[in-house]
Amino acid sequence: MDTDKLIVYNNIFEAIAQYEESSPLLLLEHNDPARLRRTLQFILLADENGKNIIIPNVFPGNLYRGEPGIYDECKPSLYRKKEYDEAELIIKELNIIDFELILKKHPYSIFYENNNLAVQYRALAQHYGLDTDLMDFSCDIAVAAYFATHKFNVETKKYELILDNNKCGCIRQITGFMAFEKESPLKVLGLQPYMRPGAQYAFAHKVDRTDDLAGKCRKVIFKQNPEANIKISKIFTHQFVNKPFPNENKLFPLEIIPLIADEIKRSHFITQDAVKLYCERFKRDIVNIKDVIASKGYSISKSPVFRFSRQMNRRLEQEINEHPYRLNMYDNAVVTTRLVCYP
């Protein structure tokens, strides 16, 4: 893309100002990041399906997405990395189902479902690294600013600060009102049994294979400025040893869930249960699907890539008793447990 024809702002703070003129983040441009305290607040709602959801206590008029470069397209990972054929898309869907089946046996998932709380397994697969048809957005522009100033390193599997001032980044904006409409492709995740979505104030937008959200988003481009980027990075870095996970990123709390997703991506088998559930959901012939799996060099297994041990289950069940929603793992997080009607 020829950036000479676009307005390119000098740093991430100028980009933020185009969306939120009075954002508290703008105080950081000439101040220490320690002056900004990020408080996570959630409220308990009932959705249209009769399930309860714990969502950010912020009316999402706008949602944001940060990107560490300038991209013409705005598509999900399933359609962005390469042009998968139909058989490969089936394999990816089966991977998502295997991930879901493993998580359903996790004590935190069981706790949520037993308490009528919605668990968004597909969105969790997206957040923990599997290819899906979902796009990540956040109602917190600070989260978007982080992803716009950090680039994912596939070798270390971590987001790394961009210090190259010859690069550009981008923040996209889309309306969040549709998240509360029935049949909307945009869904709020809120507090899930696992911590990333809550820490990131996450929303997920389903995108069809032939669709592109680029035309539905406002886009602001900025120059990567090392000094400004460092200030954004410090917002999400644990600074003290008494934090839950010293020196870890607040947006990516240490959990076993990413390791499960990685194992699924590395494995070359699909479980029998995933094949059966896929065929039930999509009304497909099981013999045909087994042929598709074999054609891609995959086998079918009775056992998943990961099982929770009894010892791990006992430890997790103890955690649930002490901190049901893991609020102790977030910075100053609060849930208002007043049930209100879904709009």
Image (cartoon, grey):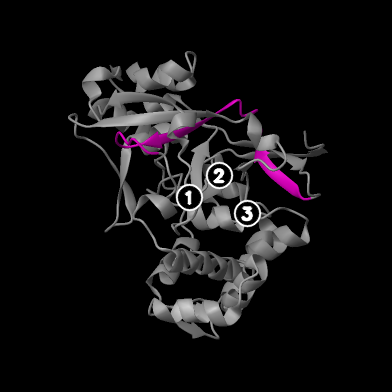
33 in the magenta segment: no
- Disc with the residue nearer the chain's start (3 vs 1): 3
Residue where numbered disc 1 is placed: 209
56 in the magenta segment: yes
The quadrant holding residue 266 is bottom left
Residue where numbered disc 3 is placed: 120
Identity of the amino acid at label 1? Answer: Arg
Q: Nearer the viewer, residue 184 or 35?
A: 184
Identity of the amino acid at label 2? Answer: Ala
Residue at left offset 24%, top offset 30%: 226
Q: Return the x and y of residue 19 as percentages of the image width and height.
A: 46, 19
- Disc with the residue nearer the chain's start (3 vs 2): 3
Identify the element where label 2 is drawn.
Answer: strand
* Image-based side of 257 in relation to 277, left or right: left
Residue where numbered disc 2 is placed: 204
Numbered disc in front, either 3 or 1: 1
Instruction: Please determine whether, in this image, residue 77 is positioned above or below residue 270.
Output: above
Q: What is the distance, in whole Å, between disc 3 and disc 2 at their CAs?
A: 10 Å
Residue lying furthest top: 21
Q: What stretch is highlighted in magenta?
A: 51-73
Q: Which of 192 and 242 is in front in this view?
A: 192
